[in-house]
């Protein structure tokens, strides 16, 4: 599992939440390179866990996302779900 920078991904607790009001809205920092993202260079990516009401998302530079391999993207997205489950389990 890839170690993720703290809270560079956001989430919604339920499908009924308004898009503009996530439970946690992360800063505009790229999950891949950990640098600030200008709005015109931002790509927001949604990630769903299996059998979960939570919906996760992260932001990346468009160029960082395009340069990443499929395996790198899968690793980041799996790490988001694993990281959340490991830090938020009772």
Image: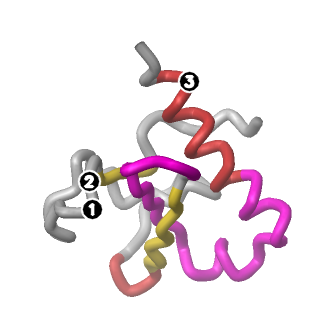
State which quarter of the image contains the C terminus: top left
Please, what secondary structure does the residue beneath circle 1 have?
A: loop
Q: Residue at x 54, y 38 (%)?
A: 5
- Furthest residue in direction front, as rendered: 51
- Picture layout, residue 60 above or below residue 67: above
* Image location of residue 69, percent across then percent down: 83, 71
Write down the residue under mark 3.
86
* Image location of residue 51, percent across then percent down: 52, 49
* Image location of residue 44, percent across then percent down: 44, 73
Residue 87 is a magenta residue: no
- Furthest residue in direction top, as rendered: 90
| Left or right: where 57 falls relative to 12 | right
Sequence-first disc among 1 and 3: 1
- Could you tell me how far apart the alpha carbons at marks 3 and 2 are, in whole angstroms? 19 Å
Write down the residue under mark 1.
15
Image marks 3 and 2: residues in contact by CB distance under 8 Å: no
Q: Residue at x 64, y 55 (%)?
A: 77
Image marks 2 and 1: residues in contact by CB distance under 8 Å: yes
- Picture layout, residue 3 above or below residue 9: above
Q: Which disc, if any, is residue 14?
A: 2
Q: Residue at x 29, y 53 (%)?
A: 12
Q: Nearer the viewer, residue 17 or 3?
A: 17
- Foreground label between 1 and 3: 1
- Could you tell me how far apart the alpha carbons at marks 1 and 3 are, in whole angstroms? 22 Å
State which quarter of the image contains the N terminus: top right
Residue density around tag 2, few if under 14, some if 14–19, many if 20 or more, within 10 Å:
few
Residue density around tag 3, few if under 14, some if 14–19, many if 20 or more, within 10 Å:
few
- Could you tell me how far apart the alpha carbons at marks 2 and 1 are, in whole angstroms? 4 Å
């Amino acid at each position: 599992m890839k170690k993720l920078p703290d809270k560079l991904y956001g989430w919604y607790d339920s499908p009924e939440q308004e898009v503009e009001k996530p439970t946690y809205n992360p800063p505009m920092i790229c999950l891949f390179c950990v640098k600030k993202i200008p709005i015109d260079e931002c790509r927001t990516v949604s990630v769903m866990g299996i059998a979960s009401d939570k919906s996760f998302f992260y932001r990346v530079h468009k160029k960082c996302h395009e340069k990443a391999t499929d395996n790198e993207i899968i690793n980041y997205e799996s790490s988001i779900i694993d990281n959340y489950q490991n830090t938020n389990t009772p």
